[in-house]
Image (cartoon, rainbow, N blue to C red):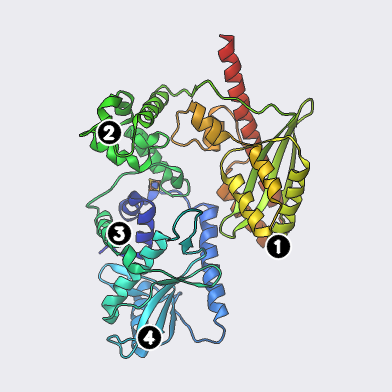
Amino acid sequence: MKTITAQDLYNFTKCHHRVYLDANGNPDEKGEVGAFIKLLWELGLQTERDYIASLGTMAVVDLQSLSVETASSETLELMKQGIPLIYQGCIQDGPYVGRPDLLIKREDSTSRFGPYLYDPVDIKAGRGWERQEGKKPRFKEHYAFQILFYRMVLTRIQDAIPRMARIINIDKEIEEFDPTVFEPAFEAALGQTNRLIAGHDSSEPVLGSHCYLCGWFQRCRRWVADHDDPTGLFFVGKQKFQLKEVGLRTIQDIAIMDVQTHLHPPKKIHRMGEKSLRRMKERAHVLLANKPVIRPGFSFPSVKREVYFDIEDDPTQNLTYLYGLLIHEANQPPRFTYFLARRPEEEESTVRAFWEFLANAQDDAYYVYSHKERATLKHLMERYHLDQEVFQHYVNREYDLYKDLIVEYSDWPTFSYGIKHIAKLIGFSWRDTDPSGANSIAWYNDYLAHPQNEHLLNRILVYNEDDCRAMVAIKDYFEKMRSSAYDT
Ligand code: SF4
């Protein structure tokens, strides 16, 4: 019998096909786990260890080293005995197997074990509640589904519904949420997870930026190419299921579609107007021709000094550790400079030094390749009460090559418009053999653990400088295309 775990429910919230492949795929087609994923695992474990250590003399029975079978019978025995705190116990009911980080006894209710019951709690290396400007706070669905899964299994084991739905976050705070809000979605997800794991449903790959860290990436990429699947196009994603329902099953179908047909029932595509459909059709042509298209109308700021700017940060620690700047001035060779926090404690002094740089730079144009730089600087400004005028001056002089140039004025024969894809298509190459933001985070954490390994910092700097150089290459490419358009 195939088992179904809380991790499967977590994965379901990210990608349905992954749930199918993990249970039914050919393991030989699954790639190695990357350094960043290993770092996340280690961070998760460390967060749990830190929390358990913070409980001091409180008695905790630790079952993490036991196999599923042994931990399962041991957990049941400990629950019967009424042990107050069980770490990494195992709860099982039919195919459902869960290992909540903590089972916490509470004595304000009864269960089949006696005048008490157990609540499941997970210890997370993150926060449960997400707060975004202008939006209602939301509890993370992937955390909630795991807790609801444990609650379901525990209810059957102890014959009583757990009282609370909670996690302990990275700051060792308890975060509570209302499980009833998630119950309908959880029930539907559980039903579909059962079908996927049993192989009665396979779903299909939905290629996107979320795939880079997945072990099945190369397999899914091949599948998408072999099937001429719509997710081979930029910006299609989950919408492909709707496209397929109205007969747009391949990129070829999209390339020859009659846009007017899909603006009205019965073939109307929800939330896709004429402009979006025409763009999607153009992208299909670009992909089939395997040649980018650059549209006219773009311009660049006319300044004495251009700064290509890229931040490296570690969201797992909420830490920004590098501000890399490639400076281009007329009649001078490009110069790379940077502000680096060698230790997390140096984050504030580093950003203050960078703020000084911004305050002293007058009319520079700042080229970036995402909204991340602006969002990170705003976050740091608020955290360290930095001068808002400096930030506003930066904002006024920032040029986002991704949003304001690549997406707006061009189409590319690739599913992702990330800098790695676009720069490689125009012939740029990184000096590092495995360049990625996720690896930069892994290298930085490796350096923190082994500060004698100075070469790790150097690897980050070379990678960051090349990201800046890739931006230069993209801008140069567009300028060249514009000049050649004027020449003809
Ligand atoms: S590569 Fe992407 S589509 Fe394929 S299983 Fe992983 S997340 Fe899903």
Q: Is residue 463 visible?
A: no
Front residue of 63/67: it is 63
Name the disc covering residue 345, or none.
1
Mark 4 or 3: in front is 3
Q: Residue at x 48, y 53 (%)?
A: 134
Mark 1 or 3: in front is 3
Q: Is residue 9 visible?
A: yes
Label total for image: 4
Q: Residue at x 72, y 56 (%)?
A: 342
Q: Earlier in the sequence, mark 4 or mark 3?
A: 4
Q: Earlier in the sequence, mark 1 or mark 3?
A: 3
Q: Which residue is mark 4?
A: 78
Name the disc covering residue 400, or none.
none
Image quadrant in which you'd find residue 269: top left
Name the disc covering residue 249, or none.
2
The response on whether ligand 1 sits within 8 Å of label 3 is no
Q: Residue at x 55, y 33 (%)?
A: 404
Mark 3 and mark 2: Cα distance apart in space: 27 Å
Label 2: element kind: loop
Name the disc covering residue 185, or none.
3
Label 4: element kind: helix
Mark 2 residue type: Arg
